Image (cartoon, rainbow, N blue to C red):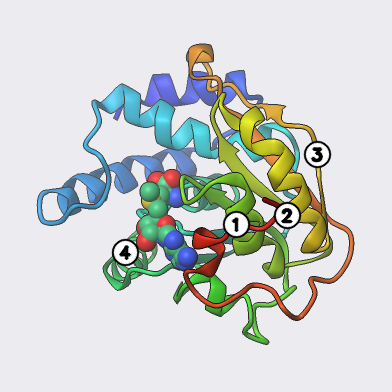
Amino acid sequence: MNRERLVRGLAALEIEADAAALERFEAFHAILDEYNQRMDLTAVLEEDERIDRHDLDSAAPLALGLLKRDAKVIDVGTGAGFPGMPLLILRPDLKMTFLDALQKRIAFLENTLKRLGLTAETLHARAEDAGRMEAHRERYDAALSRAVANSAVLQELTLPFVMPGGIAVAWKGPGVAEEWQQAKRAAYLLGGTLREPVPAPVPGRPEWGHMLLITDKTKKTPGAYPRRAGLPGKKPLGA
Ligand code: SAM
């Protein structure tokens, strides 16, 4: 792994990484390579692009100071651990839960956490089902989601996890403006207030136009939500 590129990128985001974090990033990349030879885990990227697209992009909420110390955070649809794993590597104080509907990804994450010496919870479930579970509903300071669904659908998949006073954060591209109005209406129905999109450029890659969509959880989510698995995607709220 090109450590210099990672350190330079993090410094541009004003994020410090100690030696333990850099070693863990290196080990994480090696584990991703190992698994990618056996299963379809992530798109295989050239090494520098992987640092930018996965590690630096995932770190965006830290650059914006969105996650307080010891925050309880859930990564909804984490896949191979993005954004949750880079965030946990950089901030081992976070109480992270990795959620995904695919068991093989959860098994990969459990193995990775053990090998990196990190502690976190994993949850094999659909977000629609987990959002109704007593142990997870309105229990988190922040629910994060990258590359899982459109913005309105994501409100329903993430906001039920967030306690009033917390936030949901979705990673989006330059097209987010087109989804914003509907997502705002969906957020309102779920007890949230959607902010204007916040630019979150990846260092050295301004042309990607990455944005974060942040929703403040202002009220409890009504008991009707989330609807049963599959419905949020089929009939997005706020249309
Ligand atoms: N967040 C990762 C990233 O940015 O690389 C993975 C993105 S991948 C395109 C989408 C992931 O979301 C998949 O691992 C899929 O299993 C998961 N997913 C999609 N819908 C889901 C749902 N309703 N509940 C839980 N996981 C879901």
Sequence-first tag of 3 and 2: 2
Q: Disc 1, disc 3: CB below 8 Å? A: no
Q: Disc 1, disc 2: CB below 8 Å? A: yes
* Residue tagged 4: 105
* Residue tagged 2: 186
Q: Residue at 69% across / 77% down in the picture?
A: 137
Q: Which quadrant of the figure has residue 69?
A: bottom right
Instruction: Please tell me whether residue 108 is drawn above or below residue 79 in the rendered image.
Output: below
> Residue 55 appears at what percent x and percent y?
45, 36
Q: Residue at 47% across / 69% down in the picture?
A: 230
Instruction: Please tell me whether residue 101 is drawn above or below residue 83 in the rendered image.
Output: below
Mark 1 is on which residue type? Answer: Pro
Q: Residue at 69% across / 46% down in the picture?
A: 183
Mark 2 is on which residue type? Answer: Ala
Sequence-first tag of 1 and 2: 2
Q: Is mark 2 on a helix, strand or loop?
A: helix
Q: Disc 4, disc 2: CB below 8 Å? A: no
Left or right, 101 with respect to 238, comes to: left
* Residue tagged 3: 195
| Most foreground residue, 121 or 124 | 124
> Residue 232 appears at what percent x and percent y?
56, 64
- Give the Cα separation between the discs numbered 1 and 2: 8 Å
Left or right, 222 with respect to 47, comes to: right
Question: Disc 4 or disc 1, which is closer to the eye?
Answer: 1
* Residue tagged 1: 236
Q: Label 1: how many residues lie within 10 Å, few (<14), some (14-19) or many (20+)? A: some
Mark 3 is on which residue type? Answer: Arg
- Give the Cα separation between the discs numbered 4 and 2: 29 Å
Q: Label 2: how many residues lie within 10 Å, few (<14), some (14-19) or many (20+)? A: many
Sequence-first tag of 4 and 2: 4
